[in-house]
């Protein structure tokens, strides 16, 4: 009773998977597609480590049933350098040293991309509000704020 | 989590047919962000979830009427409300509340209907909607009924919804001339659940307060009107003395509970202070709410 | 020195380069390896059934219903574990912790049974079907109660035998004291008699959690005579030794593999899940993975809560002439590394002050709560919280300026610290001056108007690095000249791989980027005591330096042997080609480092060489206190540390700022709430940690310009340093703002509000 086949677009490719109703999108990405950039930490949608993009908006993969991804467009951090080049946000995170252990980093990077789509030139307040749902236990927050601003500049130059 | 049946009906009728008035292990699910937490913690083990995400129709969308009232489909994600120009015009306090409501990812998925149906006293939207005098339209196999948000919320994670009832729409009445504010106080980190939430909505006749609604949440078992605070405010001029007596009345009236976010006596003090601060903030908003 | 940039990095002057982490690209693209991500063919998942009571005898465990659940491979209890590990007790200081609870349970959350299944959801469902019956025993939770309680957490003490100062505790019964460290300098009672004034205060710290974002995870793949464990561990060498001991195997049959860690902060030391997955893998004859949920992390290891009674005698001139420190460490149900925290922190319990008469009693105590271990500071933040709050209270009582009072009493260069060890390369005065000057101390300060009051405060601290410890490194220069470094230091985010590569690069004059650092694997990476206590850069840094110097000498010898002229800059690859006729061979160097150390005398704790280096820190804080709610906003947070010469200034700055922000959480709001032994806020929803909105508006991080002459290239560790002073600097600032003194962490809004009400003589009622 509890299994179904879902078809969706994953990082630009049409895929399908057998999933159980109680499986989250996070589990399916890891177990069926060996994508580990989104990862479960707090398990409550609070830390942002499990961030994935569904139909263009960020969701907490650990709280999102895989069944609901049927027909959706799903993007993970692994897609950002699909052409072999890092995204400006990733470059900025490296240049500003905006992480230590790196466990939360893919989530911050995906959220930053979303932030910059909404606010291409964000101020501190916008950055803090947008990223307040991502936590970093190494507390690289000051560097993350710098990285977001630097990424905004890079994107502006690229345009 | 353990296995369960998952249905995705495409009509209200079909959805209602899948619910069960007698079985609490069958539940409707909106965005699912709150329900998933209970399932992952093992405190809720459903036999069937009925997802409302494909129901559509009156369950989705934001409509502003000519009189300034709003009708919001229950499955409307909070992010859509956050960025809605209609909402910002008709009830800007809702827009102002959003940036500090949970986080972006939750707002992208969670729905306004879910926020009300969950009955969690810590959520930010229920006290705001209550203060604005919002009502909900509830559908069930027996038909349709309308209920004030104030009457919908009955206790700690408890609502007046029967197990086979669904919230279809939320109505926010026209706010012309009213001014509103919502303040929350976090005891832990800045993005903690509130220890106390206070929502107020009132009319200002120059600096005289009229027709005030004062709601406390988070510290109480449900978002609750503090009628003695309202009484103290109505007809009073905005000054320290009036705010102090309204704060005092509200603090005395609120049935406050202790938890990891603070003791009951402390939260009572927070209500006292925040009633005055919320009223000042509401009065400071420009006449159009 | 001139530098040239070539593709792949810079040659020359690798020390002092703000090189991005070697693994940066893997981390930003989600591809860095963590144990969390690892799966082995045929692997089973284990889910743990835990004790619901704090203290009791196990009468029975019923696993029959769980065994019948769909998809369950097996259910195991301590009885099963004994079949493969007859004496299943482990621990670094005491062999007191059973792999699964045996006979007794000693804290809520203690592992009692495990379900194995191929599907973790099936295992999780089956755990719900396990029941256990206990004969409940009285429990003791508080460290002061535990000292004299008739409730004993353990029937008999079982020291591991590795530490000389624990031997006398062997077989001791009817006690909860797992170590009593004593330091005696001068005559403290005579000092108090001579003192013009005596001050005594008691301070407390709360139970908090490391909360690394990669929750505890280990995979055991055990065969009869060889075991491989993949684990998120800060100490692979210790894990190997301890697993080998438990199994009765030589060390070379136990292999520990550690990729990157998603955070550690001291939690992932010694044995955590490694013994359990090993036992289960032996029983199941399959690889077994246990990956804790965040909630379960609250039942694994925490920081030590602590009660500190501190008494100071001060003479007429404001000189502290006697100080008595009684420190009680709440170690929880199993000792873990608590006795080491108790002793090592005890060396500096009297603070960075020159005091003639010092008396320290430091006690490790067993209680019926989650065990406590090291958390980014090895006990020092708890001590500094107390002695630097006390310092300000005394200064205020004496009507002396807190900075002047500190200057008067501070340990001057070369003076003997409480243990008798002279303080060298510990620029305390310079740090105090820098903090005071950044705070504009002595200049007017806006104290706020209306209900919001403003204040500022500071604190200074010293730590003796843990000694004696050993690190070993091997460097292999391959046939094309590219170096491979084998070292057991675990990169858990502190950037050690990058720093070690910079040291290799500096010695061999190659870009640090060209150095490959092998992920920790005890089959190939040599011994290291552990990645803890900010010891790695100094100890492993030296080992790596020595290994690289050996390689350099061998390259030089090869050059000579091949008749190349002195000073020739022929590439290493060409030397090999010349020697072997093709691209072949390699040059291997190794380094071992263990600093000098003189153990403290039993009974007095005195020694003239307690540690190879000192860590010193200062912090300043400016706060706004909303006196109507008690809410404190830290508007400015200054940290000044001494880390010797920074190997990688960018990473040093991130360490300073990250450490102090973590401590800001412990200072302002983090707290495990415990009711009847039960943690009532075991989740990130209810146990809040600092987020981006909690970062002070102004943060200033400074590493003062010094070198550590006996450190590798003048460097020393910095991972913990900026945790020391944050708490007392803020408490002192709160006192400055509104005249209230909080003596117990956290400084949350309710605590501050209650203090304000008490000061106004209208105390807020209790619950």
Image (cartoon, coloured by chain):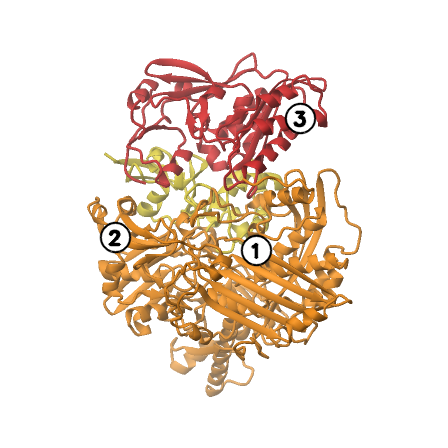
Chain colours: A yellow, B red, C orange
Q: Residue at x 56, y 15 (%)?
A: B174
Q: Chain of mark 1?
A: C
In the picture, measured across the screen, residue B206 lies left or right of residue C336, that is right
Residue C590 in picture, x, y percent from top left: 45, 78
Q: Residues within 10 Å of mark 2 (few under 14, many from 20)?
A: few
Q: At numbered mark 1, what does the secondary structure look like: helix, strand or loop? A: strand
Answer whether residue C754 is visible to the viewer in this image. Answer: yes
Q: Which quadrant of the structure image shows residue C197?
A: bottom right
In the picture, measured across the screen, residue C502 lies left or right of residue C176, that is right
- Are callouts 3 and 2 both on one chain? no
Q: Chain of mark 3?
A: B
Read off the residue under disc 1: C204
Q: Is residue C755 above or below residue C138?
A: above
Q: Chain of mark 2?
A: C
Q: At numbered mark 3, what does the secondary structure look like: helix, strand or loop? A: helix
- Distance between mark 3 and mark 2 Cα atoms: 60 Å
Q: Residues within 10 Å of mark 3 (few under 14, many from 20)?
A: some
Read off the residue under disc 3: B245
Q: Which mark is residue C60?
A: 2
Q: Nearer the viewer, residue C258 or B139?
A: B139
Q: Is residue C98 above or below residue B122?
A: below
Residue C254 in picture, x, y percent from top left: 32, 69
């Amino acid at each position: 009773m509890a299994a179904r086949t879902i078809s969706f677009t994953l990082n630009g490719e049409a895929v399908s998977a057998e999933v159980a109703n109680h499986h989250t999108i996070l589990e399916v990405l890891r177990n069926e597609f060996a994508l580990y950039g989104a990862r479960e930490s707090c398990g409550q949608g609070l830390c942002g480590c499990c961030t994935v993009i569904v139909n263009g908006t960020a969701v907490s993969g650990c709280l999102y049933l895989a069944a609901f991804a049927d027909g959706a467009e799903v993007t993970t951090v692994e897609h950002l350098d699909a052409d072999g080049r890092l995204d400006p946000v990733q470059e900025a995170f490296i240049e500003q040293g905006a992480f230590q252990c790196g466990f939360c980093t893919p989530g911050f990077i995906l959220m930053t991309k979303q932030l910059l789509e909404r606010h291409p030139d964000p101020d501190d307040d916008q950055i803090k509000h947008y990223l307040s749902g991502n936590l970093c236990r190494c507390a690289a927050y000051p560097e993350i704020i710098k990285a977001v601003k630097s990424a905004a500049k890079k994107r502006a130059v690229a345009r | 989590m353990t296995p369960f049946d998952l249905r995705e009906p495409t009509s209200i009728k079909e959805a209602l047919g899948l619910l069960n008035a007698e079985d609490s292990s069958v539940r409707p699910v909106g965005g699912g962000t709150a329900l998933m937490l209970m399932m992952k913690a093992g405190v809720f083990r459903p036999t069937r979830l009925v997802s409302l995400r494909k129901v559509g129709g009156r369950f989705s969308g934001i409509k502003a009427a000519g009189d300034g009232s709003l009708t919001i489909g229950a499955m409307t994600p909070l992010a859509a409300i956050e960025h809605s120009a209609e909402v910002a015009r008709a009830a800007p306090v809702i827009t102002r509340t959003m940036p500090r409501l949970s986080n972006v990812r939750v707002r992208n998925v969670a729905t306004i209907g879910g926020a009300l149906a969950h009955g969690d006293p810590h959520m930010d939207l229920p006290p705001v909607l209550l203060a604005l005098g919002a009502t909900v339209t509830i559908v069930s196999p027996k038909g349709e009924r309308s209920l004030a948000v104030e009457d919908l919320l009955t206790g700690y994670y408890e609502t007046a919804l029967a197990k086979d009832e669904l919230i279809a729409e939320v109505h926010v009445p026209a706010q012309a001339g009213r001014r509103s504010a919502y303040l929350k106080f976090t005891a832990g980190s800045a993005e903690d659940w509130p220890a106390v939430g206070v929502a107020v909505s009132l009319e200002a006749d120059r600096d005289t307060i009229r027709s005030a609604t004062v709601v406390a949440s988070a510290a109480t078992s449900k978002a609750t009107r503090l009628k003695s605070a309202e009484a103290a405010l109505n007809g009073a001029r905005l000054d320290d003395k009036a705010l102090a007596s309204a704060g005092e009345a509200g603090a005395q009236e609120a049935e406050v509970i202790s938890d990891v976010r603070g003791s009951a006596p402390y939260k009572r003090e927070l209500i006292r202070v925040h009633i005055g601060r919320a009223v000042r903030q509401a009065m400071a908003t420009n006449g159009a709410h | 020195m001139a530098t040239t940039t070539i593709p792949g990095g810079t040659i020359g002057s690798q020390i002092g380069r703000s090189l991005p982490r070697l693994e940066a690209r893997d981390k930003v693209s989600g591809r860095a390896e963590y144990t969390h991500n690892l799966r082995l063919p045929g692997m089973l998942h284990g889910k743990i059934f835990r004790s619901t009571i704090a203290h009791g005898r196990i009468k029975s465990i019923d696993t029959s219903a769980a065994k019948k659940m769909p998809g369950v491979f097996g259910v195991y209890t301590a009885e099963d574990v004994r079949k493969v590990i007859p004496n299943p007790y482990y621990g670094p200081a005491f062999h007191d912790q059973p792999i699964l609870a045996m006979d007794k349970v000693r804290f809520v959350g203690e592992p009692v049974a495990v379900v194995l299944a191929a599907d973790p959801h099936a295992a999780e469902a089956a755990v719900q079907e396990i029941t256990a019956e206990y004969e409940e025993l009285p429990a003791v939770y508080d460290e002061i109660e535990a000292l004299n309680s008739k409730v004993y957490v353990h029937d008999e003490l079982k020291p591991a035998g590795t530490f000389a100062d624990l031997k006398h505790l062997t077989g001791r019964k009817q006690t909860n004291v797992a170590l009593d460290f004593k330091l005696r300098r001068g005559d403290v009672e005579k000092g108090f008699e001579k003192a013009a004034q005596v001050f005594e205060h008691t301070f407390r710290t709360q139970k908090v959690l490391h909360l690394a974002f990669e929750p505890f995870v280990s995979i055991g793949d055990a065969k009869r005579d060889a075991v491989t464990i993949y684990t998120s561990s800060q100490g692979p060498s210790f894990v190997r030794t301890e697993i080998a001991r438990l199994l009765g195997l030589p060390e070379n049959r136990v292999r520990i593999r550690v990729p990157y860690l998603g955070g550690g902060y001291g939690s992932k030391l010694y044995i955590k899940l490694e013994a359990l997955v090993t036992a289960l893998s032996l029983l199941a004859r399959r690889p077994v993975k246990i990956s804790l949920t965040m909630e379960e992390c609250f039942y694994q290891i925490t920081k030590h809560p602590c009660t500190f009674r501190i008494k100071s005698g001060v003479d007429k001139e404001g000189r502290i002439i006697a100080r008595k420190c009684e420190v009680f460490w709440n170690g929880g149900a199993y000792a873990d590394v608590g006795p080491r925290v108790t002793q090592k922190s005890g060396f500096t319990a009297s603070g960075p002050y020159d005091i003639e008469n010092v008396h320290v009693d430091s006690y490790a105590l067993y209680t019926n709560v989650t065990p406590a271990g090291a958390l980014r500071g090895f006990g020092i933040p708890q001590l500094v919280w107390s002695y630097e709050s006390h310092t300000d209270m005394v200064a205020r009582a004496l009507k002396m300026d807190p900075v002047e009072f500190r200057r008067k009493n501070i340990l001057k260069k070369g003076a003997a610290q409480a243990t008798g060890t002279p303080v060298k390369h510990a620029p305390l005065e310079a740090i105090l001056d820098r903090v005071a000057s950044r705070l504009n101390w002595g200049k007017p300060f806006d104290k706020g108007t209306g209900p919001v009051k403003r204040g500022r405060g500071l604190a200074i601290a010293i730590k003796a690095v843990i000694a004696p410890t050993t690190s070993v490194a091997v460097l292999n220069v391959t046939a094309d000249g590219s170096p491979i470094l084998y070292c057991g230091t675990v990169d858990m985010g502190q950037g050690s791989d990058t720093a070690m590569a910079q040291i290799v690069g500096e010695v061999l004059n190659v870009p640090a980027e060209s150095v490959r650092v092998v992920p920790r694997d005890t089959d190939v990476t040599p011994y290291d005591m552990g990645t803890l206590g900010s010891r790695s850069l100094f100890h492993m840094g030296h080992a790596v330096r020595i290994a690289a110097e050996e390689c350099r000498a061998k390259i030089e010898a090869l050059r000579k042997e091949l008749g190349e002229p002195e000073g020739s800059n022929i590439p290493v690859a060409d030397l090999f080609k010349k020697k072997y006729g093709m691209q072949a061979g390699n040059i291997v160097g190794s380094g071992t480092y263990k600093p000098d150390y003189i153990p403290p005398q039993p009974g007095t704790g005195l020694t003239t060489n307690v540690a190879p280096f000192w860590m010193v820190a200062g912090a300043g804080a400016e706060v706004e206190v909303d006196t109507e709610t008690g809410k404190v906003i830290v508007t400015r947070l200054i940290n000044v540390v001494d880390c010797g010469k920074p190997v990688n200034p960018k990473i040093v700055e991130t360490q300073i700022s990250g450490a102090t922000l973590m401590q800001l959480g412990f200072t302002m709001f983090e707290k495990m709430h415990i009711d009847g032994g039960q943690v009532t806020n075991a989740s990130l929803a209810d146990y809040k940690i600092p987020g981006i909105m909690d970062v002070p508006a102004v943060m200033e991080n400074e590493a003062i310009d010094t070198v550590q002459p006996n450190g590798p290239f003048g460097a020393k560790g910095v991972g913990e340093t900026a945790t020391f002073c944050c708490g007392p600097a803020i408490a002192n600032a709160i006192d400055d703002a509104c005249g209230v003194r909080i003596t117990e962490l956290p400084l949350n809004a309710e605590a501050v509000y209650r203090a304000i009400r008490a000061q106004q003589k209208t105390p807020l009622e209790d619950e």
